[in-house]
Structure formats: C-alpha cells, structure tokens
Amino acid sequence: MHRMWSRKGALAAAFVLLALTLAACKPGDPGRSTGAYPIDIFQEMHYNQSYKAGEPPRLLPPEGSVPITGGYIPAVSKAESADLTSPYPVDGRTLARGALLYRQNCSMCHGLAAAGDGLVGVKLQDYGINPPAFDSVRIRDLTPGEAYSSVSRGFGGFMPRFEALLNEEDRWALVALIDAAAAERAAALDAINSLDEPERTLRLLELRDASG
C-alpha cells in the first residue's frame, strides 16, 4: 500500500511540475513573452528567458484603448498591397540594415544564406512547413508590396507578424534584401554573418540612428 501511494504521489508531483512549466512558458504571458511568436526562438537578448525572468510584469493597457503616441498603422492585405513601393531609398546601407534584421529575425527559419535551410526551418519541414528560399519562384514572384505585406502581417500561421516589432523602414529594408539580386543579397548576408552578435547589434543601432 505504501509503495502504491508513493507511486501515485510521484506521478501527481510530476503532473504539477509539468503544468507549472507550461504555464510559465505560455505564449503571451505578460511577464515572460511579447506574445508575438508561438515559440520564442529569436536571438536578441530581450527574447531570452533568463533576461525576461528579471523583468517586472508588463502592465497591459485597458481593454479597447488606443495609443495616442507611437504604435503602428496595420499593413494592408497582400492583395491590396501589390502596387506598393518603398518610400525609402535603396542603397548599400539599406541592404546592410536588411541583412542585420534578417539575421536576427528570419535566419533561424530561412537560413543564414536565405536558402530555406535554417535550423528551425529544417525541423518545421518534418511537419510539412517549408520556409522558402529567397531565390525560389514563390518569393521571386512577389511584388515588393506583397513582400512588405507578408513581412508585416505574417504568413500561413507560422511566420510571425513583424509590424508590431519592426518599424516601417526596417520592414522595407527586409523587402530590399528580398528583392535584391542573388549575388548582391549573398554579399550583404556574408558581411553580416561574419560579425559577432554585439557587433551586429551596434551596427544596426548605427544604421537606424543614421536614418533618423
């Protein structure tokens, strides 16, 4: 009898531990996650669980309230955005900015060279989800406006929405990288991949600051 109750007690304790772990990692938990991604797989420090554990709980705004400063205007749908073009000039600095943002936010699924072979992307393929390579027909057939809409609004329930996480100029920089010639994109990504994470962070801050 004693052995039977010990086994039941161990199972109950394991169940409670599992429930607490799942609750602590629940997407959207104000104290643990931005709620923007189903799973936090990204590289910046503020996505790290040990970093979040030291933060105070986030105070959510009252239901139905709207920002009077900051915030963002939701991007239009893919169908409505087909003819959109970037309001920002595209040059080497734009591609460097896009490559930095890509490395931080996209490479884990789409791969360091945008070949669709990121570590997370390969795992997703086991479930029939295939992050496309940037030189695939699927991506090359997108207009810049359609690419901007996909970056902003997400795609397919797995690619996250970046409109609340990256400003408009950042998202257009990613589109510039997507739309660049293969050799030009590869050169921009190679230059960024050669930097360590602190150097990438400082470089992105510099480019953002220079653009005003």
Image (cartoon, helix red, strand yellow):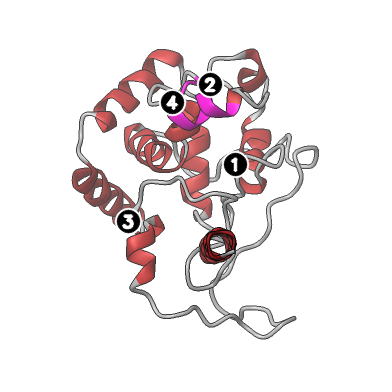
How many numbered discs, if any? 4
Left or right? Give the position of 109 relative to 113.
right
Q: Which residue is drawn at 51% across and 66% down?
A: 24
- In percent of width and height, residue 61 lies at 61, 82
Residue at the disc numbered 4? 111
* Badge number at residue 134: 2
The quarter of the picture where residue 80 lies is top right
- In percent of width and height, residue 142 lies at 67, 25
The foreground one among 186 and 194 is: 194
Amino acid type, label 3: Met
SS assignment at label 3: helix
Q: Distance between the residues labelled 3 and 4?
A: 20 Å
Q: Residues within 10 Å of mark 3 (few under 14, many from 20)?
A: few
Residue at the disc numbered 1? 151
SS assignment at label 2: loop
Left or right? Give the position of 199 relative to 83.
left
Amino acid type, label 1: Val
Q: Residue at x 55, y 78 (%)?
A: 69
The image shows residue 31, relative to residue 25, as above or below, that is below
State which mark lies toward you, 1 or 4. 4
Quadrant placement of the N terminus: bottom right
Predominant SS along the magenta part: helix
Left or right? Give the position of 143 relative to 2.
right
State which mark lies toward you, 2 or 3. 3
- In percent of width and height, residue 55 lies at 37, 75
Which numbered disc flags the more N-terminal residue, 1 or 3? 3
Q: Residue at x 48, y 44 (%)?
A: 88
Residue at the disc numbered 3? 45
Amino acid type, label 2: Phe
Q: Is residue 117 magenta?
A: yes
SS assignment at label 4: loop
The image shows residue 101, relative to residue 15, as above or below, that is above
